[in-house]
Amino acid sequence: MIAKKKILVVEDNTLNRMLLCQILANDYDVVEAENGKQALEILEQEGERISLILLDIVMPVMDGYTFLSIVKASPSYSLIPVIVTTQSDSELDEVAALSHGAADFVAKPYRPQIILHRVASIIHLRETAAMINLIQYDSLTGLYSKAFFYQRVKETLLQRPDQEFDIICSDIVNFKLINDIFGVPAGDRILCGIADLYLTHSGSRAICCRFNADQFACLLERRWEYTDEMFQQACAEISALPHAKNVVMKWGIYHVENRNIPVEQMCDRAILAARTIKGQYGKYFAKYDDNLRNKLLWEQTVTNNMDAALQEKQFEIYLQPKFRIKDNRLAGAEALVRWKHPEWGMQSPAQFIPLFERNGFITKLDQYVWDRACEVLQDWDRKGYPPIAVSVNVSRADIYNADLEDILQRTIKKYELPPARLHLEITESAYTETPKQIVDVVGHLRELGFIIEMDDFGAGYSSLNMLNEMPVDILKLDMKFIQSETAKPANQGILRFIISLARWMSLSVVAEGVETQEQLERLRAIGCDFAQGYYIGKPMPVKDFEVLLQQSPPPLDCGEESLHRAQERQNQILLLVDEDAGYRNEVRKALGDRFQIVEAADGRTALASIAVYDRRIAAAVLSMTLPEESGFEVLEALQREKAFCRIPTVATGPAGMQLEGKAFAAGADDFAAKPHLQTSLLKRIQHVIYASAFEEEMPDAAPDGCGLLGGQNS
Amino acid sequence: MQELKDAFAAYGADYEATMRRFMGSQPMYLRFLDMFFQDDSLQKLGAALDAGDLNAAFEAAHTLKGTSGNMGLAPLYAAVCAIVEPLRTGTARGDYPVLYQVIQAEYQKADAFRHSLKRGDPV
């Protein structure tokens, strides 16, 4: 219910005043004053909440003219319109009132219809004029601002009741990513380009605005049926803008039927429609229609039922087994949720999980699943089955829950389980959204002993730099993101690359969504550790899984495997060749906890170490100023090794182009000029290791053309 | 209803225009009409004319004009209008007592009209 506008009636005669109030009472809130003095007091309290003043001129104490002069001279009240009530007996009165700043006059005896119309139109006029003070244009694109757009649309719909209109809103998918990759100025240029397209294509009668950051809205006369071709064409034009090649834009259309709903809501409906086709390739626009309305209604029904469903234990966990690929041994389970509704029957998680993620219920459901999973594990422990670990989902919303840690700890304590029995699956895209927070929260959980699995790896946009910082034990690779992989032999490198990357980072890899023999064989061939999927084991009720567990040899724990790996990682060797003992000392202090450091003061010792440690050497830091230039000899030796097993090398030495050039010519992967920060050395080492792993797996790819590599640290 | 209309016509007032001002509500009209007769503007006008205070006389007459107009008491309104104009300009005139007597007479007639309405009113 919209609050009524407030009108101040100033009139000394009780009868006239009360009559005026009666006339206005249905449509307005009315406050009364008997004379100018009282009216000023009321203005002081109410200020700009007064939309209009109705003023009698002939009054005792303070007459209408005096009051009018004071009001019009005051910066706070001068914008409030005043209508003077006169007794049509003198034109002079009217002229005097107008010249004192009255907006209009009405005559006594009152004619209610005329008064109401004048009041309404003066208020409207004033509000419209006040709009000019709104920020009219969006400073970036020059389109209308949102507030101004709303106002213009409202007016247009009022003024042209017989014309049909549509509101079209557009939304760019992942616009933040564009800003992130190409920088905000590039993103801004794209927005301006899109704004220009809107102006060119929507015609002179359309009203366009930038609705939100990367959303645009437009009011169009309804002239045609919308087709995919129209929007496809627009998309093509947008793609032609600089840096906009991968911009994906979705349009939502709201056909204006009910003009009484606020324009805001019309735009929201159009945006809602646009969102429904997010992620659907080849879909350019969606209309807000009965289907969508029904879907939203359905979602509302689900929302209304979900709490009761949880209480009535309508949600049930299913367990899907994981196996070690090399010997098909059971290696854990993932807990998945099913909803058995008494009337609707079995509901697919695909239907309700996205909704629960949006409405926040997912956190409750997740906690329920954690609890149920732990309860099952305790039951099995009591029955004397060999221990098995279960993965549960930790949604994005859970991460933001300050109690997450407490809840998880309480749950495992309640069922007397060590934390490592619970694997926490966190989707990769959550990591990319709020890297800092998530690294902190998840890092802490990992310290507490929970095993962390990164879900949907390969679907997000993690840079390798980030991956190294992330607290993760296991990568879960969804085959659906790499299914095109198996079909295209030319690109098979990516899967291999991910596996070797995981290997280097001491992470285990679980491939999920394995649905065919062929996929499984390929995973086996490239050395993937674990697999999960319909082909090898469907999600099953707890009872069925119990049978499987009883029939299987004692299960492995993929988490334990990755813990072993993490220890191995500590054992990776960094060969540090430098004539300066002080320098070696510094580097050892800084990097000793990341690598096992093998030192050499001269070329001969270095060569001996290479022979001894061989493939365990992850990288070398090599001084180019060793006695007798033996650094180059070592580099040559490392080069020779390259044919078989690459040892990436960061050359060091005093800054100077000549030495640097020689080092690169001799095959160094990077050059760190002394003196340098230890962190900068570490970054260089990490980069050369990544780069060499990458080259090994994808010899055809140009390393600097690959977004995965993040910034080149040179 | 018809009685009411007849009463208005007999008195010389415009039923439609007047009732519209009161949202067609007879009870409301009668309430306001009572309020009109509680107002002391007529007495003030007489006193001011006796004292020769033309300013005060104008204010009183002006109020009376406004209220009688709003009440749709056309004959009274016309009588008040006749005095308001000369008073507005502050013109000293000999016929003010006569004009005032006419107003008084019309005032009585209006009061009689009020009573006729009340008698006819089932409430």
Image (cartoon, coloured by chain):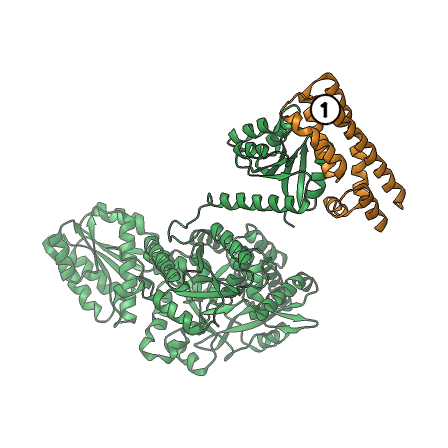
Chain colours: A green, B orange
> Which residue is labeled 1 in the image?
B95
Task: Choose top left, top right, bottom left or bottom right for residue A175.
Answer: bottom left
Q: Tell me residue A229's x, y (percent).
A: 41, 74
Query: Is A56 situated above or below A618?
Result: above
Please state, as top left, top right, bottom left or bottom right, where the C terminus of chain A lies in the image.
bottom left
Q: Is residue A312 left or right of residue B12?
A: left
- Tell me which chain the residue with mark 1 is part of: B
Query: Is A574 situated above or below B104?
Result: below
The crowd level at tag 1 (other Cα within 10 Å; few <14, some 14-19, many 20+) is few
Task: Choose top left, top right, bottom left or bottom right for residue A412.
Answer: bottom right
Residue at far front of view: B94
Residue at image x 55%, y 27%? A70
For the residue marked with disc 1, what is the amino acid? Asp
Residue at far bottom of view: A517
Decide which of A367, A33 is in the foreground and name it: A33
Q: Tell me residue A684's x, y (percent).
A: 26, 55
Instruction: Report whether residue A653 is seen.
Output: yes
Query: Is A632 situated above or below B79?
Result: below
SS assignment at label 1:
loop
Q: Tell me residue A559's x, y (percent).
A: 47, 64
Residue at image x 32%, y 63%? A241
